[in-house]
Structures are given as structure tokens and as C-alpha cells.
Amino acid sequence: MKNKISYKLISLILLISFVITCISVYIQINNQYKNEITTFKKSLDNIKTKQIPLLSQSLWTVDYISVDIFLNNLIKSEKIIYAQVIENNGNTISKGQSKDQDIIKKEFIINKNINSKKYPIGKLIVVADLTPLYKNLQNNAIGIIFTEIIKMLLISLSIILVIKKLIINPLEEMALYANTLSLENLSKPLCIEDSNKDNLSELGIVSESINTMRVNLIRQIKESEEKNNIMAQQAKLAAMGEMIVNIAHQWKQPLSLITTTASGIQINNELGQLDKKQLDYYADEIMNSANYLSNTIDDFSDFFKPNKSKEVFKIINCFEKTFKLLNTQLINNNVTLIKNISDIEIYGFENELIQVLINILNNAKDEFARNKQKRNLVFVNVFLTDNKINISIKDNAGGIKENSVNRIFEPYFTTKHQSQGTGIGLYMSEVIIEKHMQGKLNVRNVEYKYENEVYTGAEFNIIINKEGKKNEKI
């Protein structure tokens, strides 16, 4: 970019200079040609005023010797190559050799003055050769062209140096600034020598406008970050609400077991039938249930643990944690998972990816609740291609309405009832994948065949690099 500006401007200046030089050379040579021709014609016209009277006298006295001498003197000039006298009686006298090209032909009437009256007695034809004139012009043209080229180069060089200092260098600085501008150096303003607040030139105005745009961009980025932070908190709170429901579902059975076991201990104790073996059995049941409750809390607390730095983790473990967190809801909604997950290590934000997977699976679960199916199927495929991890999650819940599929990742857009969805889950999922993990998240409706049955559903595709940027934080 930097050199392109210089090359284009320099080429343009040289082209303009060349055109001007060609025009100047043409004008100079054309003017010199016209001057030479005019001078040439004037020298021929002198024959009429100075020599025709002598020729008239020789013809009048029939002195042909003088006429021959007159004609010989004419053709001795390097300009005149042919001279001819034609008398009124048809008699002709000629000297020299005529030709057809590069000549000027002049005719002069020969008169004899008698008693102040003019009587024509013949005419003189003179042919002048322009070849010496053209040779002279050619030699002069070479000198003119050489001189004009030198002048063109000197003037062009001066113009280029001035324009480079005043225009090209500032433009190259602007181009370099624009090419290297990023979020990391957005706080650095554009500074060019020409821009000062007291007397801004055109380039200074452009520089000032770029800096104003940069300041506005910084402000908008901050506003966007604040908006995303608010949405992230909302998404986290929504996810927390979902997790609390999951905890409640997963705790029902072990709590019921603990209550039943405690009642059994109390009844057997009142009946006097509680021995050490039974007590140990009941204690083990209570301890196992309590451990299950504790492990459940640990799983959910791990998900909500703030993890601000990237780490190496296995994709298959990430999915197992996700399935474990959603296990009760998937069972209650009769969701069958068909998994084909490669054992791949990835460098990124594990809890962030889990949040994305939960959002996608929750959407599938909610669609199953709205659209009753004979079988609720979710297909999960994970494979590696060209050092990129491809994650495909598709269901058979009927797909997304065509007028909604292109808006599914917009903030606060939801296809559910307002009491059931906030419209920020998938938006934050896209932010996490594209902004935090430098990947891609998209969705489409698909029709496919499984076990001789044709299904229609939504397919979410996640593509992320196996190795993200090192030491990155959020």
C-alpha cells in the first residue's frame, strides 16, 4: 500500500510531464518550420523585386547569353534547383533539374515597362528544394527533444520531491496507520507533520477526521463491551436458573432416599429391630446419597467457576460435563443422544464452550417440548479437519422457521414465549465462539435419514481452531 501510492503518483507526474514535453517539442518544431518556410519564401520573393528587371531587359534585347547567365546564377543557390524562362512566343530556356517532392514552386510574370506601362513578355518558373531545410529542422529537432527531456526530468524530479514531501509521505503514513490499526493500538492517534490545529491543510483535515473516527470507534467499542458484559451476565443468570432447576431434579431422588432411610432407621429403632448390620446399611445409603448431592454441587460450581484464562482440555470431557449437567432434563424429555466424538485436545475456554453447548442442547430440548415427536434425537459429531475442530449438533425437532433462521443469533430475539426465553443465549454463544475463541458458529435447517426414517431439524455447526492464541484472557 505504501509503495503503491508513490508509484502511482510518480507515474502520473511522469506521464503528464511526457505529454507536456511532446506538446512543447511539437510546438517548437512546428514554429521553426513555419519560420523557415516564411524566410524561404521571402528569399524567393526577392527575385521578383531585385532580379526580374534584369531578366526583363535581357529578354527585351534578345540577349540570351545574359539570360543563360541569369539562370545559372539562380541554380547556383543551394535552395533553387531548377529555373525556366518561357517567352510569350513559346520559346523556353531552362537550367537545372526539377523533382516532384519536397519542393516549393514559384512563378513570376516578366514585364517590360514602356512609357510607365507594363507589357508582359514572358514568365520565370523557379523550383526550390526543401530537403536542406528539412535536414536542418531534423538536426534542430534532436537538440530540442534532448533539451526538453532534460527540462522535463529536472522539473518532474522537483515536482516529485515536493509532492512526496507534502502529499505522498502523509498519505503513506495514513495508509500505514490504517493497515496496522487494530484493537491493541487503537488508542494511538494518527500524527502527521502537516496536521496542526491552528492552520489545518486538506491532509490535516483528513488526519483530524481519522482521529475523530478513531475516538468514536473507541467509544462505540466500550459501549458494545458494556452491552456484551450485561448480556453475558444475563445469560449467566439464565443459565444459573436452568442449573438450579437441574439441581432440583437431580436432588429429588437422593433426598427422597435419605428421607426414606431415616424413616426406616426410626421405625426399626422403635420396634427394637435395629441391629448393627442394618444401621451400617442405612448409614451407607445415607452417605452415598449425601456424596451424590455433594458431587452434584461440585459439578455445578465448577461450571460457574470464573475461568478467565485459556487452558488445554479434551473435547470429549467437555461434552461429558455438559451431558452430566443436563442429564436429568434430557432424561425427563426422553432425549436420545447419538454421539460420535473424537478424542481431541483443544486450547481454549472450557467453561465458555460448555455454556455454548448447554445453550444449543437446551434449545433442542425446548423444541422437543413444543413439537411432540415419536423419538427425540440429538446427533453430536466432533471431528478434526485441517487443524480445525468441527462440532455438529442436530436434532429432529422440525427445524427453525425460515423467517427466523437468519435472526437466530440477534440479541433478544427468541422464537419462544417471553416467559420461556430471553433471546440472549444464542447471541452470547456466537459472541463466545467468534470473539473469545476466534471461531465460527452457524445454523441451518437440514433433512436427513436415520434408521430408515426421514427427519427434519436444526443443525448447529461450530468451527474452532485446535490451538488458539496463547496467553489470551477474557
Image (cartoon, grey):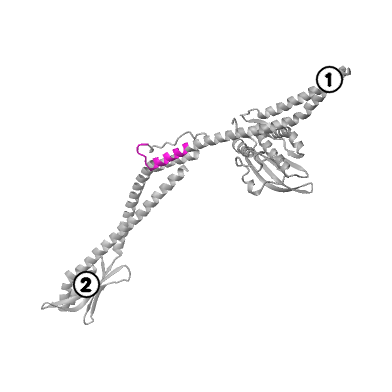
**Main SS class of the magenta portion in the image:** helix
Magenta highlight on residue 200: yes
* Left or right of 173 on screen, residue 76: left
Q: Give neighbour class at mark 1: few <14, some 14-19, many 20+ (Cα, 10 Å).
A: few
**What amino acid does circle 1 point to?**
Gln
Observer able to see residue 281: no
Q: Nearer the viewer, residue 70 or 218?
A: 218
Residue 71: numbered disc: 2
Return the x and y of residue 205 as percentages of the image width and height: 40, 41
Image point 31% across, 54% down: which residue? 144
Label 1 secondary element: helix
Residue lying farthest bottom? Answer: 89
Q: Nearer the viewer, residue 432 or 220?
A: 220
Residue assigned mark 1 = 266
Q: Nearer the viewer, mark 2 or mark 1?
A: 1
* Left or right of 24 on screen, residue 85: left
423 versus 251 height, above or below: below
Residues at circles 2 and 1 in contact by the CB criterion of under 8 Å: no
Residue 59: numbered disc: none
Observer able to see residue 445: yes
* Left or right of 259 on screen, residue 167: left
Return the x and y of residue 377 as percentages of the image width and height: 75, 42
**What amino acid does circle 2 point to?**
Leu
20 versus 415 height, above or below: below
Return the x and y of residue 430 as percentages of the image width and height: 62, 39
The part of the chain drawn in magenta is 197-215
